Every structure is written in C-alpha cells, then in structure tokens.
Amino acid sequence: MDIQLTEEQELLRSSIQRFLRDQYDFDERRKIVATDEGWSRKHWSAFAELGLCAAPFQESSGGLGGGSLATMIVMREFGRHLVIEPYFETVVLAGGLIEDAGSPEQREAFLPNIMDGSAIWAVAWAEGRSRYDFNNVTTTARRQGDNFVLSGAKAAVIGAPWADKLIVSARTSGGPRDRDGVSLFVVDRHSANLHLQSFKTVDGRRAAELTLMDVHVPASQLLGAEGEGVVALEACRDRAIAALCAEAVGAMSVLNSATLEYSKARKQFGVALGTFQVLQHRMVDMFIALEESISLTQHLSLSLAAREPNGSKLASGAKSKVGYAARFVAEQAVQLHGGMGMSDELNVGHYFKRISSINIQFGDPAYHLMRYAQQS
C-alpha cells in the first residue's frame, strides 16, 4: 500500500522536512536533551506556528482537519529526527481524548491552547501493576460536594514534568479490575497534594511517578461521562498506536539509510563491508521490514480516518508487526555498525533506544500479538 498524498498533505510534509533539516539536526537535538528542561520551547512554538499542533483536529474544533493522516505525516518526520518535544503526549493523546470525549465547553476551553502551543499536556493512566490494562485502576475518585477527591499513584507518565495539565484515570465505582467505573479527570499539575518524582527515560525524554493524596478536582473537570473512561482510553490507544508506528517507520528509514552508507564507506579486509553477500542479505531484510511497516502504518491510518469497525484489531496487528520489524532493523543497524553502533556520538544508538521505548508504549509486540489473536 502506498498513499498518494494530497497537495495540502505534501505541503505539510515538505514544511516539516524543511524545518527539521535546517533547525533540528542530531547535534541540535543533543543540545536540547542536555538542557535542564530537556526540551525546547522555541522549537515547540515553531511547531505550533507551522500548524502542526492544529493539523489533526477537526475544523469544527478549530483545527486544520487533517485527522489521522496528518498525524502520520508529522510523526514519521519526527521519527526521522528523534524530536523530543511532547507532540505525541500533548496533541495525539491529550488532544485526541479531549476532542473525542470532552464536552463542547471543555473542547472550547482546552483545545485552542493545545493548538496554539501555549499548553503542554500529559496522560496518566498506567499504574505499577496495571501493565497495559486500562481496567486495572486502583486510584480512586470520590465525590465530595462540587469536587472529586483523587487518591492513588500513577507510573511512568511521559512528559509529566513538562506538563501544565494532566488527564488522570481514577475509579469512581466498581472493583479494581472492572471495565465500568473508570473516569477521566483534568488535573492541574501544580495542584495541592499532587507530587511528582521526575526522571529521565532511556530515550532522552522526561517522565514522572505521580502520587495523588486527596487532590481536589472540580466536578466540571470530569472528562466525558462518569465511569466510561476505559472506552475513551481504548479509542485513544488506537490513535496512539498509529502515531507510534509512524514514528517508528521514520526512525527505521534513517537507520536503513545510515547502515547502507556505512557499509559502502567502511572497509574490512581491504574491501567495503557492503560487498559481503551475507551483509547484503541482512540489508535486504531490513529494507523489506521497513516497506512492510510503511504499508501497515498507512493501512491503519486510513482505517482510523474512515472509522472502520476493525480499527482496534488492525491497531494491535500493526503494533505487533511494526514493533518486531523496528526492533530487527535497530538491532541489525547496531550490529553492522560494530562497537560504535551504541556510542553516544553516533545517532544509531539513539534511534535504537527510541525504538525500544516505542515498543513498550501502549503494549509491546507480544502483548498485541496475543490481543490480535483473541479478536480473530
């Protein structure tokens, strides 16, 4: 499958490519990651000015109406350059949840600040023992007058140290593993009794462990219907998987190109590495893995855009297949580059780390292979 992009989509892709090529090379990214904040507000503002933060949202919400295909285009180019800024967390996850589940008043209140780049968001749904299960929620939210009082802990919330707002899942009714009874809340990151323990992730991002100790949230900040948060999170997962697959495809394409160039330049026993047939076969396998991943990612994005009923099953199939393919490409790239493949100075190791992180977000390949089989 090969999508023929429209003129508007081509313009979006070319504008991203031009900006990242000129202002976001590997050395610039390393400088950004090394700063105290770990991301660049200047570049984030530039992304918003280019319309990237508004691109996926519907025109009725004030966006550009690009949908899942716009997300695919942006995330693939971000994957090529290992963009560190929280586009995925803010626009794809939080923005998607607000547009999908929020009330008209909430969409009007929150989405403009996401689209103009003035607000950073993160989604806190995972807990220490929940693994990839949205139902497994021990964080509680009890009603107290005009407020909900949240208590519990959330694990590995990517982008939380940068965020202004958090979307937190908490149980308002039912048992710890019940599908019904999980609700979503918009929580100010600086709320009283909300504590963050921040840390750096292996791929250079920032995350945090959250502890909520009787955090008061106005009832108006309940996102969507009470007790129906799992349904909203499952739809969010499908969109998230499509975005992560696109980012992985972008990273894989760079690894393939870098490995091919290295095999032409690096000599062993007086000849270029690329002349060895066994290594040629490996690079052919890497190329096939990339092409298959591109096809699956495009298929998934088109299915989500068309709101096809099998989108969730297709998302699991893509996450599994692309995850295994990306890991294969990353491992081969590192091995074919030799010892320098994992050195900090070479970009190959950084792509390897990012792919490793992508593979465990919203379910690893083995989890989604099992989930795909259960839906067959």
Image: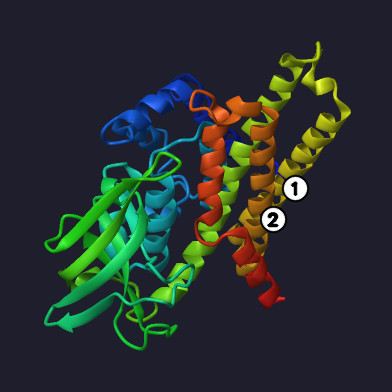
Residue 139 % position (x, y): 29, 74
Viewer-closest of 96 and 372: 372
Look at mark 2 in the image and give the residue it sits on.
321
Residue 154 % position (x, y): 32, 64
Q: Residues within 10 Å of mark 2 (few under 14, many from 20)?
A: many
**Residue visible at 44% across and 43% down?**
202
Q: Residue furthest top?
A: 270
Tell me, yes or no, whether the two marked residues, 1 and 2, touch with CB atoms within 8 Å. yes
**Residue visible at 49% across and 69% down?**
234
Q: Is residue 179 above or below residue 348?
A: below
Q: Is residue 214 left or right of residue 329?
A: left
Viewer-closest of 53 and 212: 212
Q: Disc 1 versus disc 2: distance between alpha carbons? A: 9 Å
Query: Identity of the amino acid at label 2?
Result: Lys
Q: Nearer the viewer, mark 1 or mark 2?
A: 2
Query: Identity of the amino acid at label 1?
Result: Glu
**Which picture quadrant has residue 290?**
top right
Look at mark 1 in the image and give the residue it sits on.
292
Residue 82 % position (x, y): 49, 35
